[in-house]
Image (cartoon, rainbow, N blue to C red):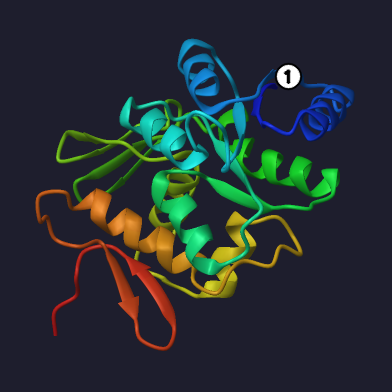
């Protein structure tokens, strides 16, 4: 894979560059937010490792701008902050995953494999549920013919829900399907993704497709009426 690392700590950036290169990846490194944003928009990367606290432009602002410009490259945020609110802020900005400092390289490598896995060999098929269509090859999503911009992780969530439309999906089921084994997720990370998907799938007030099943989990599909 070709990976862009945007990290202002020169020593850490070099550790990441060396480790990722030894893992077989091609790595570009930048040390400030504005330069990292420009390189991300001008290049063709498989993933971006982005620090939150950067000079000139912070990582959250960078990822928001990348998503605003419809760049769907998976983004892994690095953060020294350790609160749930900080994690949610990163995901809401459009990042696909987060990793708290300090971390071991094996964990970063595993997170990158997870968020890029769906891009490596996408199934060449189309999923349909009601008026929502997910193209398995391009990973593009439409509702009633209108394009919907999703991040890689959001697309993976939607795909899992569509593949299991009509079924009640519990939190453990979603974690097992969408995160690497042994990963401890924040208590409300799944809820964050569900909230984002609901909003993006109904930008103009269209009927909700993700329904909370109280005490159980979530069900994808049209609302059921008694």
Which quarter of the rendering shows the N terminus?
Answer: top right
Q: Is residue 92 left or right of residue 122?
A: left
List x then y, in percent, for residue 172: 59, 73
Residue that protrudes farthest toward the top in the picture: 42
Residue that protrudes farthest toward the front in the picture: 56
According to the picture, the residue beneath numbered tag 1 turns out to be 27
List x then y, in percent, for residue 55: 56, 31
Number of marks in picture? 1
Answer whether residue 174 is visible to the viewer in this image: yes
Q: Nearer the viewer, residue 191 or 133?
A: 191
Q: Measuring 84% from the left and 43% from the top, which residue is drawn there?
A: 105
Secondary structure, mark 1, is strand
In the rendered view, tell whether residue 187 sits above or below residue 124: below
Q: Measuring 51% from the left and 60% from the top, which residue is drawn there?
A: 86
Q: Measuring 43% from the left and 77% from the top, which residue is drawn there?
A: 217
Query: Circle 1: is it few (<14), some (14-19), or many (20+) Cα within 10 Å?
Result: some
In the rendered view, tell whether residue 71 sits above or below residue 130: above
List x then y, in percent, for residue 132: 25, 45
Q: Nearer the viewer, residue 33 or 172?
A: 33
Q: Measuring 56% from the left and 43% from the top, which residue is drawn there?
A: 52
Q: Nearer the viewer, residue 139 or 32?
A: 32
List x then y, in percent, for residue 102: 78, 53
Answer whether residue 157 is visible to the viewer in this image: no
Residue that protrudes farthest toward the right in the picture: 22
């Amino acid at each position: 894979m070709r990976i862009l690392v945007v990290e202002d700590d020169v020593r850490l950036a070099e550790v990441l560059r060396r480790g990722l290169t030894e893992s077989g990846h091609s790595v570009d490194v930048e040390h400030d937010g504005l330069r990292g944003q420009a390189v991300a928009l001008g290049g063709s990367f498989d993933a971006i490792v982005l620090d939150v606290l950067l000079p000139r432009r912070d990582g959250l602002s960078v990822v928001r701008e990348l998503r605003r410009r419809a760049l769907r490259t998976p983004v892994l945020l690095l953060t020294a902050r350790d609160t749930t609110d900080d994690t949610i802020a990163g995901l809401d900005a459009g990042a696909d995953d987060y990793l708290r400092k300090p971390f071991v390289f094996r964990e970063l490598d595993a997170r990158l494999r997870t968020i890029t896995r769906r891009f490596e060999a996408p199934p060449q098929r189309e999923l349909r549920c009601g008026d929502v269509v997910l193209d398995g090859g391009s990973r593009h999503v439409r509702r009633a013919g209108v394009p919907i911009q999703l991040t890689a992780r959001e697309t993976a969530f939607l795909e899992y829900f569509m593949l299991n439309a009509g079924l009640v999906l519990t939190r453990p089921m979603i974690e097992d399907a969408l995160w690497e084994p042994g990963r401890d997720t924040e208590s409300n990370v799944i809820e964050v993704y569900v909230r984002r998907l609901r909003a993006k799938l109904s930008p103009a007030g269209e009927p909700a497709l993700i329904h909370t099943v109280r005490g159980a989990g979530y069900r994808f599909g049209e609302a059921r009426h008694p």
